[in-house]
Amino acid sequence: MAIPVLVVGCAGKMGREVIKAVHAAPDMYVIGAVDRSHLDADAGEVAGIGPIDVPITDNLEVSCAMVAQERSPGVMVDFTHPRGLYDRVRTAIAYGVRPVIGTTGIAPEQLADLAEFADKASTGCVVAPNFAIGMILLQQACLRAAEYFDHLEIIELHHDEKADAPSGTALATAQLIASTGKAFNPAKVEETELIAGARGGLVPGNIRIHSLRLPGLLAHQEVIFGGTGQSFSLRHDTTDRSAYMPGVLLAIRKVLGLKSLVYGLEKIL
Ligand SMILES: NC(=O)C1=CN([C@@H]2O[C@H](COP(=O)(O)OP(=O)(O)OC[C@H]3O[C@@H](n4cnc5c(N)ncnc54)[C@H](OP(=O)(O)O)[C@@H]3O)[C@@H](O)[C@H]2O)C=CC1
Ligand SMILES: O=C(O)C1=N[C@H](C(=O)O)C[C@H](O)C1
């Protein structure tokens, strides 16, 4: 049976892409669309694919109740803003709707709390800071490089409409590299930062992240490893948001078979 999908943030850059991808997929359909603007407009029209008979509403609870009435279990896809995300995920789970979350910037304590909530409800939930396969491969390659290099820094570059910094992907990449337990970037001199922020943000693992925001960019990340007489750069460029859609559709299919919260696309590949 086809999967009913509720798209939250449907009028946004990612939400429009999700509406297109879900509508085009043979094994799922858009059952509802939530946003704060374009209310009552057809979600398909807003996404640029013509009418799909799904009006945009700002009422998540009523939308979840509607999904719960469908014959097969439903999924909520959220690409919005970290504000209120915690409550949206809890609302979805309370209605038996499985969340697939692409929104970045949620606090780690809230994520841990949601994992406990999903676990208790035996409900699947996927939270992934990046749905592009190329980025997952970059992260895996970082683990290999980290075996041989002791020094690295991360640069992430995004469009200038991005709300959070650093990106969720950069944080997740640093977290993954730090999970090796290695002590990175041993200091060689006592540094003085003449302009606050010049050396980027420091995250656990002693890894620095530098965030650039410019019009003309979409989403890019470079991890540069440094060693004696050599440097090694790993870079991923997203040039179109359709890059995320195979990962999003995969998560929609896989979340139905899960009984707890899974963090990271790599866990369901
Ligand atoms: N995991 C991944 O692979 C990716 C994740 N992202 C993440 O997805 C999120 C969205 O990105 P993007 O699409 O570029 O952002 P946009 O600002 O283009 O879209 C977000 C949409 O969500 C709406 N919105 C915000 N808050 C709410 C709410 N409480 N209820 C309903 N709708 C809401 C916004 O409305 P309004 O305009 O009124 O604020 C807007 O229409 C970000 O956190 C970004 O980091 C992005 C790309 C890939
Ligand atoms: O806001 C974006 O655009 C993106 N956000 C995600 C993040 O914060 O990592 C994923 C990707 O980088 C695009």
Image (spheres, grey):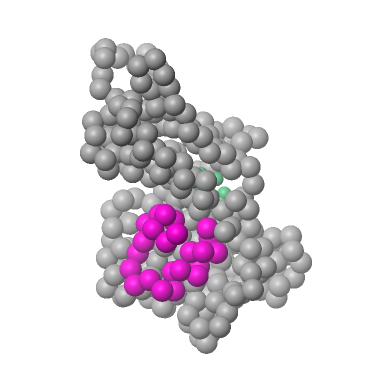
**Viewer-closest of 50 and 264:** 264
Which residue ends up furthest to the right in the rendered image? 50
| Left or right of 143, for residue 82 | right
Residue at screen point 41% across, 74% down: 257
Please identify the quarter of the rendering in which residue 238 is found.
top right
Question: At which x and y percent is residue 203?
Answer: 31, 35
Please identify the quarter of the rendering in which residue 261 is found.
bottom left
- Whether residue 12 appears in this view of the structure is no
Q: Is residue 176 magenta?
A: no
What segment is highlighted magenta in the picture? 247-269
Residue at screen point 48% across, 33% down: 234
For the image shown, how many numbered marks are present on the structure? 0
- Up-down relation of residue 20 to residue 218 (above or below): below
Question: At which x and y percent is residue 202?
Answer: 32, 31
Q: Quadrant of the C terminus?
A: bottom left
Question: At which x and y percent is residue 152?
Answer: 37, 28
- Whether residue 5 appears in this view of the structure is yes
| Left or right of 106, for residue 103 | right
- Up-down relation of residue 160 to residue 34 (above or below): above
Q: Is residue 251 magenta?
A: yes
- Up-down relation of residue 91 to residue 189 (above or below): below
Q: Quadrant of the N terminus?
A: bottom right
Residue at screen point 39% across, 15% down: 229
Question: At which x and y percent is residue 240?
Answer: 64, 47
Residue at screen point 46% across, 45% down: 137
